Image: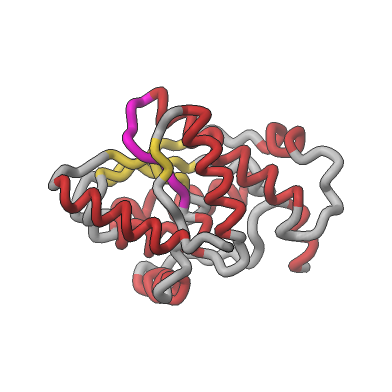
Amino acid sequence: MKENFYLLFEKQIQEIKEKKKVPTLLLHSCCAPCSSQVITCLTNYFDITILYYNPNIYPEEEYLKRKEEQIRLIHEIKNINKLEIIDCDYDNDIYEKEIKGLENEKEGGPRCYKCFNLRLNKTAKIAKENNFEYFSTTLTISPYKNSNIINTIGLELEQKYNIKWLYSDHKKKDGYKKSIELSKKYNLYRQNYCGCIYSKRIDE
Protein backbone atom coordinates (compact mmCIF):
# COMPACT_ATOMS: atom_id res chain seq x y z
CA MET A 1 0.00 0.00 0.00
CA LYS A 2 1.36 3.40 -1.02
CA GLU A 3 2.05 5.78 1.86
CA ASN A 4 0.17 9.07 2.06
CA PHE A 5 3.14 11.32 2.67
CA TYR A 6 1.01 14.43 2.97
CA LEU A 7 -0.87 12.93 5.92
CA LEU A 8 2.45 11.96 7.51
CA PHE A 9 3.64 15.54 6.96
CA GLU A 10 0.50 16.92 8.63
CA LYS A 11 1.07 14.61 11.59
CA GLN A 12 4.63 15.94 11.98
CA ILE A 13 3.37 19.53 11.84
CA GLN A 14 0.78 18.80 14.50
CA GLU A 15 3.43 17.33 16.80
CA ILE A 16 5.60 20.44 16.28
CA LYS A 17 2.67 22.75 17.07
CA GLU A 18 1.97 20.84 20.29
CA LYS A 19 5.57 21.28 21.44
CA LYS A 20 5.23 25.06 20.99
CA LYS A 21 8.85 25.32 19.87
CA VAL A 22 10.17 26.46 16.50
CA PRO A 23 12.61 23.84 15.16
CA THR A 24 15.29 24.45 12.54
CA LEU A 25 14.88 23.13 9.00
CA LEU A 26 17.41 22.86 6.20
CA LEU A 27 15.27 22.96 3.08
CA HIS A 28 16.78 21.96 -0.24
CA SER A 29 15.32 24.16 -2.98
CA CYS A 30 15.43 23.37 -6.66
CA CYS A 31 14.25 26.84 -7.73
CA ALA A 32 12.42 29.94 -6.56
CA PRO A 33 9.00 29.10 -8.06
CA CYS A 34 8.87 25.68 -6.38
CA SER A 35 10.11 27.09 -3.08
CA SER A 36 7.56 29.91 -2.99
CA GLN A 37 4.61 27.84 -1.79
CA VAL A 38 6.76 25.55 0.37
CA ILE A 39 8.25 28.52 2.24
CA THR A 40 4.79 30.05 2.63
CA CYS A 41 3.55 26.79 4.14
CA LEU A 42 6.50 26.04 6.41
CA THR A 43 7.47 29.50 7.69
CA ASN A 44 4.70 29.27 10.28
CA TYR A 45 6.40 26.31 11.96
CA PHE A 46 10.16 26.41 11.25
CA ASP A 47 13.24 28.58 11.19
CA ILE A 48 14.12 27.83 7.57
CA THR A 49 17.48 27.84 5.88
CA ILE A 50 17.29 27.28 2.14
CA LEU A 51 20.05 25.12 0.66
CA TYR A 52 20.56 25.98 -2.98
CA TYR A 53 22.45 22.92 -4.20
CA ASN A 54 21.64 21.97 -7.79
CA PRO A 55 24.72 20.76 -9.70
CA ASN A 56 22.41 19.16 -12.28
CA ILE A 57 21.45 22.51 -13.81
CA TYR A 58 22.96 23.25 -17.22
CA PRO A 59 24.34 25.58 -18.47
CA GLU A 60 25.97 27.70 -15.79
CA GLU A 61 24.16 30.83 -17.00
CA GLU A 62 20.85 29.09 -16.31
CA TYR A 63 22.08 28.01 -12.87
CA LEU A 64 23.04 31.57 -11.96
CA LYS A 65 19.74 32.97 -13.22
CA ARG A 66 17.75 30.51 -11.07
CA LYS A 67 19.98 31.16 -8.07
CA GLU A 68 19.53 34.92 -8.33
CA GLU A 69 15.75 34.46 -8.42
CA GLN A 70 15.95 32.26 -5.31
CA ILE A 71 17.93 34.91 -3.43
CA ARG A 72 15.53 37.65 -4.55
CA LEU A 73 12.52 35.65 -3.42
CA ILE A 74 13.99 35.09 0.05
CA HIS A 75 14.33 38.85 0.47
CA GLU A 76 10.82 39.60 -0.81
CA ILE A 77 8.56 36.77 0.34
CA LYS A 78 6.49 37.15 3.49
CA ASN A 79 7.94 35.02 6.28
CA ILE A 80 6.97 34.48 9.92
CA ASN A 81 10.09 32.86 11.35
CA LYS A 82 13.74 33.05 10.28
CA LEU A 83 14.51 32.62 6.58
CA GLU A 84 18.10 32.37 5.34
CA ILE A 85 20.05 30.75 2.51
CA ILE A 86 23.18 28.63 2.07
CA ASP A 87 24.54 28.99 -1.44
CA CYS A 88 26.70 26.17 -2.82
CA ASP A 89 29.20 26.53 -5.63
CA TYR A 90 28.23 25.41 -9.13
CA ASP A 91 29.72 21.99 -9.94
CA ASN A 92 28.07 20.30 -12.92
CA ASP A 93 30.96 17.81 -13.12
CA ILE A 94 29.87 16.07 -9.90
CA TYR A 95 26.40 15.57 -11.38
CA GLU A 96 27.77 14.20 -14.65
CA LYS A 97 29.97 11.77 -12.71
CA GLU A 98 26.99 10.66 -10.63
CA ILE A 99 24.73 9.85 -13.59
CA LYS A 100 27.39 8.46 -15.96
CA GLY A 101 25.90 5.71 -18.09
CA LEU A 102 22.33 6.93 -17.54
CA GLU A 103 22.40 9.86 -19.94
CA ASN A 104 19.83 8.31 -22.29
CA GLU A 105 17.40 7.13 -19.63
CA LYS A 106 13.91 8.55 -19.81
CA GLU A 107 12.92 11.50 -17.63
CA GLY A 108 11.77 10.34 -14.19
CA GLY A 109 13.83 7.14 -14.34
CA PRO A 110 17.18 6.00 -12.87
CA ARG A 111 19.02 9.20 -13.86
CA CYS A 112 16.55 11.31 -11.90
CA TYR A 113 16.80 8.95 -8.92
CA LYS A 114 20.57 9.51 -8.87
CA CYS A 115 20.03 13.26 -9.11
CA PHE A 116 17.53 13.32 -6.23
CA ASN A 117 19.85 11.22 -4.10
CA LEU A 118 22.87 13.43 -4.84
CA ARG A 119 21.09 16.61 -3.78
CA LEU A 120 19.30 15.17 -0.76
CA ASN A 121 22.43 13.45 0.53
CA LYS A 122 24.24 16.80 0.45
CA THR A 123 21.30 18.39 2.27
CA ALA A 124 21.23 15.75 5.01
CA LYS A 125 25.02 15.90 5.45
CA ILE A 126 25.06 19.69 5.83
CA ALA A 127 22.03 19.57 8.12
CA LYS A 128 23.78 17.08 10.40
CA GLU A 129 27.05 19.00 10.43
CA ASN A 130 25.26 22.22 11.36
CA ASN A 131 22.88 20.78 13.97
CA PHE A 132 19.63 21.33 12.11
CA GLU A 133 16.68 19.44 13.56
CA TYR A 134 15.05 18.59 10.21
CA PHE A 135 15.91 18.42 6.52
CA SER A 136 13.62 18.30 3.50
CA THR A 137 13.13 19.44 -0.11
CA THR A 138 10.84 21.50 -2.35
CA LEU A 139 11.08 18.96 -5.19
CA THR A 140 7.75 17.29 -4.46
CA ILE A 141 5.67 20.34 -5.32
CA SER A 142 6.17 19.44 -8.97
CA PRO A 143 3.55 17.09 -10.48
CA TYR A 144 6.42 15.62 -12.52
CA LYS A 145 8.42 14.46 -9.48
CA ASN A 146 7.74 11.10 -7.81
CA SER A 147 7.03 11.83 -4.14
CA ASN A 148 7.34 8.17 -3.19
CA ILE A 149 10.91 7.99 -4.50
CA ILE A 150 11.91 11.30 -2.90
CA ASN A 151 10.49 10.40 0.52
CA THR A 152 12.08 6.95 0.37
CA ILE A 153 15.47 8.58 -0.22
CA GLY A 154 14.79 11.07 2.58
CA LEU A 155 13.97 8.31 5.06
CA GLU A 156 17.10 6.35 4.11
CA LEU A 157 19.20 9.46 4.72
CA GLU A 158 17.41 10.05 8.02
CA GLN A 159 18.79 6.69 9.15
CA LYS A 160 22.23 7.31 7.66
CA TYR A 161 22.77 10.71 9.29
CA ASN A 162 20.46 10.41 12.30
CA ILE A 163 18.55 13.57 11.48
CA LYS A 164 14.77 13.94 11.04
CA TRP A 165 13.31 13.91 7.56
CA LEU A 166 10.31 16.22 7.12
CA TYR A 167 7.88 14.34 4.90
CA SER A 168 7.34 16.05 1.58
CA ASP A 169 4.42 15.98 -0.85
CA HIS A 170 3.80 19.66 -1.41
CA LYS A 171 1.82 19.23 -4.62
CA LYS A 172 -1.16 18.18 -2.47
CA LYS A 173 -3.89 20.65 -1.48
CA ASP A 174 -3.30 22.64 -4.71
CA GLY A 175 0.33 23.25 -3.77
CA TYR A 176 1.52 23.39 -7.36
CA LYS A 177 -1.29 25.74 -8.36
CA LYS A 178 -0.46 28.02 -5.43
CA SER A 179 3.22 28.06 -6.44
CA ILE A 180 2.19 29.33 -9.90
CA GLU A 181 0.10 32.07 -8.29
CA LEU A 182 3.00 33.10 -6.04
CA SER A 183 5.37 33.07 -9.00
CA LYS A 184 3.10 35.58 -10.71
CA LYS A 185 2.84 37.66 -7.54
CA TYR A 186 6.63 37.92 -7.19
CA ASN A 187 7.24 37.99 -10.95
CA LEU A 188 9.52 34.96 -10.76
CA TYR A 189 11.37 33.47 -13.71
CA ARG A 190 9.82 30.07 -14.47
CA GLN A 191 12.15 27.79 -16.40
CA ASN A 192 10.84 25.59 -19.20
CA TYR A 193 12.91 22.49 -18.38
CA CYS A 194 13.82 20.66 -15.20
CA GLY A 195 17.50 21.50 -15.11
CA CYS A 196 19.98 19.07 -16.64
CA ILE A 197 21.08 19.09 -20.27
CA TYR A 198 19.17 15.84 -20.86
CA SER A 199 15.83 17.27 -19.72
CA LYS A 200 16.56 20.35 -21.84
CA ARG A 201 17.02 18.16 -24.94
CA ILE A 202 13.71 16.41 -24.25
CA ASP A 203 11.80 19.67 -23.94
CA GLU A 204 13.38 21.03 -27.11
Res. 93 visible in picture: yes
In the rendered view, how is the structure colored?
Answer: secondary structure
Seen at 52% across and 29% down, the residue is: 160
Please provide percent x and percent y for residue 145: 60, 61
In the image, residue 191 sits, relative to residue 110, either above or below, namely below
Identify the magenta region: 130-137
190 in magenta: no
Quarter of the image with the N terminus in it: bottom right
**In the image, 168: left or right of 40?**
right
**In the image, 201: left or right of 23?**
right
**In the image, 196: left or right of 67?**
right
Please provide percent x and percent y for residue 88: 50, 34
Decide which of 72, 45 is in the foreground and name it. Answer: 45
Seen at 20% across and 49% down, the residue is: 81
In the image, residue 81 sits, relative to residue 169, either above or below, namely above
Spot the residue most to the left: 20
Seen at 53% across and 50% down, the residue is: 151
In the image, residue 169 sits, relative to residue 124, either above or below, namely below
Please provide percent x and percent y for residue 190: 53, 66
Res. 184 visible in picture: no
**In the image, 160: left or right of 194?**
left
Seen at 36% across and 25% down, the residue is: 130
Labels in figure, total = 0
Quarter of the image with the C terminus in it: bottom right
Decide which of 140, 69 is in the foreground and name it. Answer: 140
Occupied quadrant, residue 146 = bottom right
Spot the residue most to the front: 1
Please provide percent x and percent y for residue 3: 52, 60
Occupied quadrant, residue 109 = bottom right
